[in-house]
Image (cartoon, grey):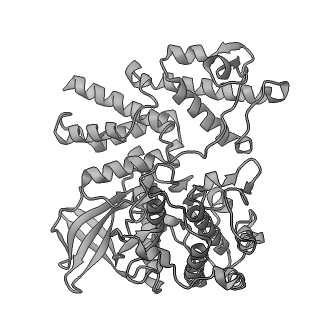
Amino acid sequence: MPLPQGEIITGRYKILRQLGQGGFGRTYLAEDSQLNQMCVLKEFAPQVEKPEDIQKAKELFEREANVLKKLQHSQIPKFHASLSTKFGQKDFFFLVQDYIEGDTYWDLLDKRLSHGQNGFSEEEIISLLKQMLPVLHYIHSRDVIHRDISPDNIILRSSDNLPVLIDFGGVKQVPASQGFWMTQLGANRTLLGKKGYAPEEQLRQGKAFPCSDLYSLVVSTLVLLTGKEPQNLYDSYQGTWRWGTDIKVSQGLEKILKKTLAYKPSDRYQNAEQVIKDLQKLSPAHSPAVNKANTNITKIKTMIAAPARRAGNLHSRTQMAVHALPLPVWMRPFAVSAVTTTAIVLVCAGTWGVVNAVVKGVSSISLPSISLPSLPGGGNSDSSSETTTSNNGSRGNIASRRASLQIPEGFFTQTVNSIFYSRNPQLQGRNLGTGAEDEALRQQWVSIGQELLDKLEQAKLSSTARQKLGSYGGQDYQEWEQRASNGDFGNYTIKQLNTDTNRKFDDLFPGQRRGKLNQPTFGQIWYAIAADKVSKLEARN
């Protein structure tokens, strides 16, 4: 349970309110009675079940504390202390950090777009780069790589209009002899980063270089410049960014940004100083000293551990993969640290605010927009996209089987496409034709569909749960949580529901929860399993 308002930690820090909750714990706004100022307490309380996952969570939490202790920069929140205390029989661990007042750059962009304005100007982007690159040079010079740079992890501090780099929950310390960082648990490594913002070597291989942070910073500036998510700025089929169409900047700046975004790490700028040097060569007209346009925007109070988030549902969230924490679906956006809440960080006042923000975060975790495969017949209807030759060569009507199970077509097609493209990333953006050249791919698509139907049959879901696939959402969990709190399920708790659902889901889809559950696809199956469990509890009580 969250610490109550008014609770005093180690006789010094008074809890004012909870700010967010994540996979590794909670964050609180607190008052430091000795310094007579507000601060942020970050509690270590991972919502995990397996010992190895608790070990991983603790490892990342302790790493963050160790790294923050040695980082002393005016544009990085100051680390004050790490604490341990007991409440009852339970040990509690906390980090104490500065409270930073201001808006995240994601919030600033959202305000502009919501008022019908454009994104940031080229001059503002150059100014942001010039103000942030020295910060990256500083942390890299101390063998630290942030690995999670994005517009929602940079705050425009209201006191001096300088950008502040926050959320060091996923930091890496780079061994000088190795040149990159990876966390080892047995033979596995942890991959971490925001899809679209992090480069390939980071998301796929667990490698992180200084130029990986530079890549993420530049992607962030493109998002601020265009008001569009990375997946809408990158042509995955051609493997190129949309320069000159969606991304329009001066020739000089485009050259710098292109080099920073090179696919191969060796082709990029290798350090922040190199980028700064080339930026200085640009026309003075493109190099304002201060981002004055932001000074007229009303500020929203936020803090280092929980910047507010855009209400939209497109923004990518930080993801851990391979040995990531198996969090419940409604907590999935919090997977990295309590600092990274909403998805990964939330600013919420009260329990319902937290839940609602989490729901929005969960629904945003999805694959980039892609063209669905046109299977036999060239369309995506039941008769065309679901009926073809099975993997065994026999004629099968996958549409009829889906219909007999009362599984909604939209959910089924989206889930099969999601799996298909995850196995064939090189096909994203192109339709499958009806010719012989795509026969093997069509068979693969149908095979995936048959496998999915097999799994859904094995799940023994009720017809009601199957019919609702594709329609589940946070409101369902809110209702279950409220009813459990009211005692409608007897002694059965939300935590037990989470554990039981996880166990059944993992039996059906081993390893799937190691990454983020996509809300419109696998997340729906998780909800359906939970819904059937709730129905049984209702019948029993």
Q: Name the spot of residue 70 as percent of width and height, x first.
A: 47, 84
Asked where in the image residue 21 lies, by quadrant, the reply is bottom left
Q: Which residue is depicted at the point 67% across and 14% down?
A: 396
> Is residue 206 something one can see in this rendering?
yes
Location of residue 528 with respect to 186 vertically, above or below:
above
Left of 401 or right of it: where is 71? left
Number of marks in picture? 0
Asked where in the image residue 250 lies, by quadrant, the reply is bottom right
> Is residue 273 something one can see in this rendering?
no
Location of residue 191 with respect to 176 vertically, above or below:
above
Placement of the N terminus among the 4 image quadrants: bottom left
Q: Which residue is depicted at the point 63% across and 72% down?
A: 214
Placement of the C terminus among the 4 image quadrants: top left
Foreground: 439 or 63? 439
Location of residue 315 with respect to 535 vertically, above or below:
below
Q: Which residue is depicted at the point 71% across and 77% down?
A: 270
Foreground: 485 or 44? 485
Left of 535 or right of it: where is 453? right
Q: Name the spot of residue 216 as percent of width and height, x first.
A: 61, 66
Left of 188 or right of it: where is 364? left
Q: Which residue is depicted at the point 26% across and 63% down?
A: 18
Q: Name the spot of residue 532 as percent of width and height, x first.
A: 35, 27
Left of 181 or right of it: where is 485? left
Q: Name the spot of residue 507 as percent of width and height, x first.
A: 48, 35
Foreground: 203 or 365? 365
